[in-house]
């Protein structure tokens, strides 16, 4: 199994970290890093990544999935246009996934127009020229898998990892239990900003 992960300058390290670590270390998935133009990129946390290849050269036949990591560039005028690659992966039956701001790239490609999806907000997607998926937007805290398309808000990296792996056919009860460990702190009902009860 082989997945292309697209990282951009100032990408949000935490959004795909669990997915990448679980896929590579626990499931033996081959991860190929790509960036627009194949340039070296630095994450918000300061990680400097030298990609394997330019995102524009990704060929669906060589991969099982395409994952776009979030970051502020997706909301900027300088956002890379990866619509051709996104549509090619989608049309060839590959998994296509995006989290946080990267969902805007899926909206721009048109693949969300006919697919249930989520994102940081409905308003963020509505700002994308040509986006026609308003009626298929779902406002929810967890990642959403619709067929082979996975979308998530930036606050849902754990369920994003789970849904991407499930879409790739790598899901299992053991994997669900493992990923649930990472989501456990959010299931307590305790507000982290309030003092713990005695």
Image (cartoon, helix red, strand yellow):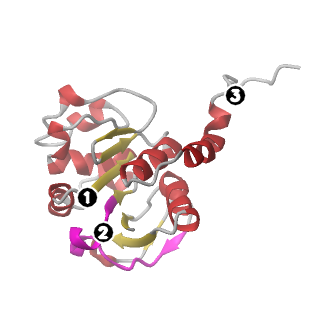
- Looking at marks 2 and 1 on the same chain, the residue that comes earlier in the sequence is marked by 2
| Quarter where residue 94 is shown | bottom left
Residue 193's disc is 3
Residue 152's disc is none
- Whether 51 is among the magenta residues is yes
Tag count? 3
Dot 3 lies on which element?
Answer: loop
- Whether 155 is among the magenta residues is no
Residue 155: horizontal and vertical position, in percent?
Answer: 49, 39
The span shown in magenta is 47-66
134 left or right of 151 in image: left
Query: How many other residues sit within 10 Å of disc 3, few (<14), some (14-19) or many (≥20)?
Result: few
Residue plotted at (36% across, 49% down): 167
The residue singled out by tag 2 in the image is 63
- Circles 2 and 1 in contact, beta carbons < 8 Å: yes
112 left or right of 186 in image: left
Residue 169: horizontal and vertical position, in percent?
Answer: 39, 53
90 left or right of 176 in image: left
Q: CA distance from mark 2 to mark 1?
A: 8 Å
Dot 1 lies on which element?
Answer: loop
Residue furthest to the left in view is 130
The residue singled out by tag 1 in the image is 94
| Quarter where residue 2 is shown | bottom left
Where does the C terminus fall, quadrant-wise?
top right
Residue plotted at (38% across, 64% down): 5
| Quarter where residue 183 is shown | top right
């Amino acid at each position: 199994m082989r997945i292309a992960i697209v990282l951009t300058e100032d990408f949000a390290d935490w959004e795909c970290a669990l997915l990448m670590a679980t896929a590579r270390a626990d499931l033996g998935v081959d991860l190929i890093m790509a960036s627009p133009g194949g340039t070296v990129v630095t994450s918000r946390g300061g990680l400097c990544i030298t990609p394997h290849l330019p995102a524009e050269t990704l060929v669906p036949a060589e991969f099982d999935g395409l994952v776009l990591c979030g970051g502020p560039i997706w909301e900027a005028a300088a956002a890379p246009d990866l619509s051709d690659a996104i549509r090619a992966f989608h049309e060839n039956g590959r998994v296509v996934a995006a989290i946080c701001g990267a969902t805007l790239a899926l909206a721009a490609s048109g693949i969300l127009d006919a697919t249930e999806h989520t994102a940081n907000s409905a308003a963020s997607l509505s700002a994308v020229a040509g986006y026609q998926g308003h009626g298929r937007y779902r406002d929810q805290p967890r990642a959403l898998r619709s067929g082979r398309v996975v979308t998530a808000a930036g606050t849902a990296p754990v369920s994003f990892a789970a849904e991407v792996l499930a879409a790739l056919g790598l899901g299992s009860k053991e994997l669900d239990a493992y990923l649930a460990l990472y989501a456990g702190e959010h299931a307590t009902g305790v507000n982290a900003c309030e003092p713990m009860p005695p």
